[in-house]
Amino acid sequence: MLEKVRVRGPAGRPRTHPHAVAGDKAYSSRGNRGYLRRCRIKAVIPEKKDQSANRKKKGSKGGRPVSHDTELYKERNSVERLINRLKAWRGIATRFDKTPASYLASLHLRASIIWIKDRNRSSK
């Protein structure tokens, strides 16, 4: 999923590597963190308690503790709200569409509807 990210700036082509990626504890796997480290992307993902306990149990061979930017993690709330608004559409929440292309089309349609509603609300 991260390979498809495009971050638009005020000018020029979109960046393919964001400065940071925020996620919840479900994305704290070694593989995800390794991918972000290789791409030089800051991971703003808290460590699960069981992962922390296993790392501490290994002692000096367990590696370094995971760094975590608490303030940046709080900004993840706006993204979570958007995802919840997308999932309010039943087709997205239950994944009725069988092909990735039709699912992506429904995501685009739902995002457009949200954008239009918000734009109309802010103009009143």
Image (cartoon, grey):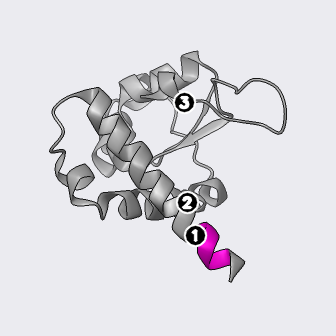
Q: Residue at x 46, y 49 (%)?
A: 46
The image position of residue 76, as x and y in percent, is 54, 57
Q: Residue at x 39, y 31 (%)?
A: 59
Residue 56 counted in the magenta span: no
Question: What secondary structure predominates along the stretch shown in magenta?
Answer: helix
Which one is earlier in the sequence, the residue at label 3 or at label 2? 3
Closer to the camera in the image, 77 or 83:
83
The reply to whether the C-beta atoms of the residues labelled 1 and 2 are less than 8 Å apart is: yes
Looking at the image, is mark 3 or mark 2 nearer the viewer?
2
Distance of mark 3 from mark 1, alpha carbons? 23 Å
Closer to the camera in the image, 108 or 36:
108
Residue at image mark 3: 5
The reply to whether the C-beta atoms of the residues labelled 3 and 2 are less than 8 Å apart is: no
Bin the neighbour count of mark 3 within 10 Å (Cα to Cα): few under 14, some 14-19, many 20 and up: few
Q: Residue at x 46, y 59 (%)?
A: 113
Residue at image mark 1: 118
Q: Quadrant of residue 44?
A: top right
Secondary structure category for the residue under label 3: loop
- Specify whether residue 77 is in view: no
Closer to the camera in the image, 33 or 112:
112
Bin the neighbour count of mark 1 within 10 Å (Cα to Cα): few under 14, some 14-19, many 20 and up: few
Q: Is residue 1 above or below residue 81?
A: above
Distance of mark 3 from mark 2, alpha carbons? 19 Å
What is the number of callouts on the image?
Answer: 3
Left/right of residue 100 with respect to residue 32 in the rendered view: left
Residue at image mark 2: 115
The image position of residue 78, as x and y in percent, is 55, 62
Left/right of residue 21 with respect to residue 1 in the rendered view: right
Secondary structure category for the residue under label 1: helix
Write down the region rendered in magenta.
118-122
The image position of residue 22, as x and y in percent, is 53, 46
